[in-house]
Image: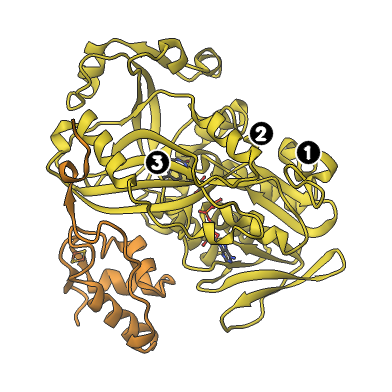
Chain colours: A orange, B yellow
Amino acid sequence: MGDDVIVCRCEEVTAGEVRAAIRAGARTIAAIKKRTRAGMGLCGGRTCARLLARLLAEETGLPVAEIAPPPSRPPVRPVPVAALAEEE
Amino acid sequence: MANVVIIGAGIVGCALAARLAENGVKVTLIDQAEVVAGASGANLSLVLWSDAEPGVSLTMTRRAWDELPAEVADLEARTGLDLEFRRIHTLSLVLEGMDPRAALAGGAHLTEAGFQTELIDPAAVHALEPAVDLGGVQAAVYQEQAAINPFYFTLAWADRARVAGASIVTGRRVTGFRMDGERIVGLETAGSGEPVGGDLYVLAAGAWTRALALTAGIDLPEYHIIGEACVTEALPPLLHGLVGEAGDNRVPFELELAARGGDGSDLRLAEFAAIQTMSGNLVVGQVSHGGPGSGPDGRQGNRPAVRPGALRDLATGLVQRLPAARSASVIRAWAKPVPFTPDHQPIIGRVASRPNLFIASGLKSALIITPLLSKLIVEAVIDGDLGSLRPFSPGRFPQGGFEELRPGG
Ligand SMILES: Cc1cc2nc3c(=O)[nH]c(=O)nc-3n(C[C@H](O)[C@H](O)[C@H](O)COP(=O)(O)OP(=O)(O)OC[C@H]3O[C@@H](n4cnc5c(N)ncnc54)[C@H](O)[C@@H]3O)c2cc1C
Ligand code: FES
């Protein structure tokens, strides 16, 4: 995958930026997220998590199966503020 | 000091690692997860001086504030990261039934230290934050505070530490200290890897500090609240600064929790606050509650989940105060423990009965103070003298603050 390829569409993060995060010490998807914002977009990482795992495996030599999935944060899907709020 | 091990890669641990390594000390920084996994990545991004008391002194906060722009510029120049540091105003809305003077609590004090605060009328609130709809309330306004990207702020210190030669070990949970009498001789860790050890152990594990200190036979009077917050999708500009509510419920809430030895899952405090990030997301806080305690039986409380009801309270606050955000989507919520002490001062310094253990924890508003505090702590570690940090020494607690000091025991 070329460095210019966008791996996280929501946050427009490229493979090159993810590789740089890994070079700076990121060893988990959670760590990549914090440095690049990849996975922090509207889709909550559903679209990009597997690509991030693949890049991590390629760069570190870790087997894909050993890469922990990103921590899931509620709400599981985006929910409008008004649907969550308690209104009179 | 030849060889220092720092436990906890939050903002405190990372800043200490950078400064010690830059002073020629061999540093190992170890974290159970990754850099910025704890409260340092879960906060509202505020660089607040209005929070200085109770807490570290106003004088120290003033110095930290004055030095901060240069510290940020230096970090950015060394790391190439943009920390998104920006000056913002913060508004504390005076809700119905509240004494407006209470909203300005500490006002005179702050003015003396050269910080500007004033009470403004509803029209002026509207002029500052046109999207906020409160049906005409007053607000205390702090014209010049600041915000910063908390992930990048912490990562920049970690990068700086690495460049200076520190070794950063992530994904290794410390499960305890190995002792030889009063001295720590190594760390017990979960998972595989090289053994980690050094001459001095700096415990900078935030809300987890008490549980770890217990494994060295030390019971620090440090407790934690669990803070919950959420973030929306990116939106067009709606807020210029921070909008929150004036209130002084935090201190009694924490004191009650401390009186119960930190155990208080039923204690709860909702304080509305919202700020928009540089990317346009609204970060909305904060519901706080007590955990099951951080003592020997309460360690599970250190990995909290967002409680049912927290999202409802955060969303309810947001639609009331910022109607334009009602159709925005909430995309993430989180819960993280934040430490506090009964006197609201951090715990910094060596423990008399454990000659190679140094505590650096208990900060509730870490973003403004850490650049200065880390500088002073490194001086203290190198000189073996706490200097101006003496008021924060663990020795301030009765009996040295340790084994004997079990609340109620
Ligand atoms: C919702 C919320 C809003 C906040 N708002 C603000 C704000 O606007 N401004 C502000 O200044 N402050 C704010 N705070 C407080 C601030 O985030 C904390 O004061 C600060 O992050 C503390 O930093 P720390 O480095 O001491 O702890 P942490 O960042 O919690 O770091 C501790 C580290 O230790 C690691 N660790 C723990 N146990 C172990 C172990 N056994 N082995 C190895 N590693 C371990 C953890 O993984 C973690 O990375 C807020 C907090 C919350 C939760
Ligand atoms: S594609 Fe990465 S968060 Fe949506």
Q: Are marks 1 and 2 in contact (CB under 8 Å)?
A: yes
Q: Are marks 3 and 2 on the same chain?
A: yes
Q: State which chain disc 1 sits on.
A: B
Q: Quadrant of the N terminus of chain B?
A: bottom right
Q: Of the numbered discs in the image, which one, if any, rests on residue B396?
A: 1
Q: Which residue is mark 2?
A: B343
**N-terminal of the two: label 1 or label 2?**
2
Q: Does dot 1 land on a helix, a strand or a loop?
A: helix
Q: Which residue is mark 3?
A: B287
Q: From where the camera sits, is residue B205 visible?
A: no
Give x and y (percent) for residue A43: 18, 62
When asked about the image quadrant of residue A13, the answer is bottom left
Give x and y (percent) for residue B178: 76, 72
Amino acid on which the number 3 mark rests in the picture: Val
Q: Quadrant of the C terminus of chain B?
A: top right
Q: Does dot 3 land on a helix, a strand or a loop?
A: strand
**N-terminal of the two: label 3 or label 1?**
3
Amino acid on which the number 1 mark rests in the picture: Arg
At 64% from the left edge and 70% from the top edge, which residue is drawn? B175
